[in-house]
């Protein structure tokens, strides 16, 4: 973003015309929800902003449960959440594993994710 436009951002955010998403170098700026609603494009706002963390985790968990018989590979999970990077999906998977809702079998590309607690998590 050009420097002369960056100076206008705080005023636009304070006025409610622009929203900031994220922090630091990865901060993104999008038009406010109200402006998209006025334009009749509420869906565009949601797609642009992205889904919240809980929704992303729920989508991953649903896919893993739906494929419980064969397990879900990372490439499938990346298809479920194409807007997220591989590392972002891995963070969500670690959180779900810590919560005890999923477990993995195998390592690297061959790893598959299954619902429930795995054998290694059951041992003290």
Image: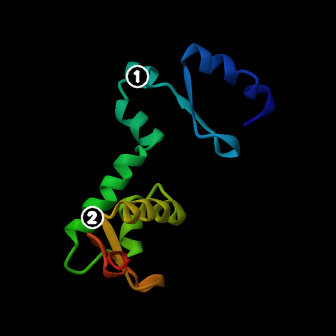
Give the camera-side residue of 65 and 101: 101
Per the rendering, the mark at residue 63 is 2
Q: Nearer the viewer, mark 2 or mark 1?
A: 2
| 2 to the left or right of 101 | right
Q: Quadrant of the C terminus?
A: bottom left
- Spatial CA distance of label 2 from label 1 is 34 Å
Name the residue at 40% across, 37% down.
46
Q: Quadrant of residue 2?
A: top right
Give the camera-side residue of 63 and 8: 63
Q: Quadrant of residue 102?
A: bottom left
Q: Residue 10: horizontal and vertical position, in percent? A: 68, 21
Name the residue at 45% across, 65% down.
94
Element class at badge 1 = loop
Residue farthest toward the front in the current orientation of the protein: 124
Name the residue at 41% across, 73% down.
74
| Position above or below: 57 against 111 | above
Give the camera-side residue of 73 and 8: 73
Q: Residue 76: horizontal and vertical position, in percent? A: 36, 71
Residue occupied by mark 1: 39
Q: Quadrant of the N terminus?
A: top right
Residue farthest toward the right in the current orientation of the protein: 3
Q: Quadrant of residue 40?
A: top left
Task: Of the two numbered discs 2 and 1 on the same chain, state the one appearing first in sequence.
Answer: 1
Q: Residue 14: horizontal and vertical position, in percent? A: 61, 16
Name the residue at 38% across, 22% down.
37
């Amino acid at each position: 973003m050009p420097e002369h436009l960056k100076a206008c951002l705080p005023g636009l955010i304070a006025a409610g015309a622009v929203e900031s998403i994220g922090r630091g170098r990865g901060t993104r700026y999008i038009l406010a929800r109200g402006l998209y609603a006025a334009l009749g494009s509420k869906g565009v706002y949601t797609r642009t902003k992205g889904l919240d963390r809980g929704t992303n985790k729920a989508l991953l968990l649903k896919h893993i449960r739906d494929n419980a018989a064969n397990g879900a590979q990372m490439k499938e999970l990346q298809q479920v959440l194409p807007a997220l990077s591989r590392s972002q999906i891995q963070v969500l998977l670690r959180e779900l594993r810590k919560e005890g809702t999923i477990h993995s079998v195998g390592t690297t590309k061959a790893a598959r994710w299954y619902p429930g607690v795995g054998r290694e998590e059951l041992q003290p």
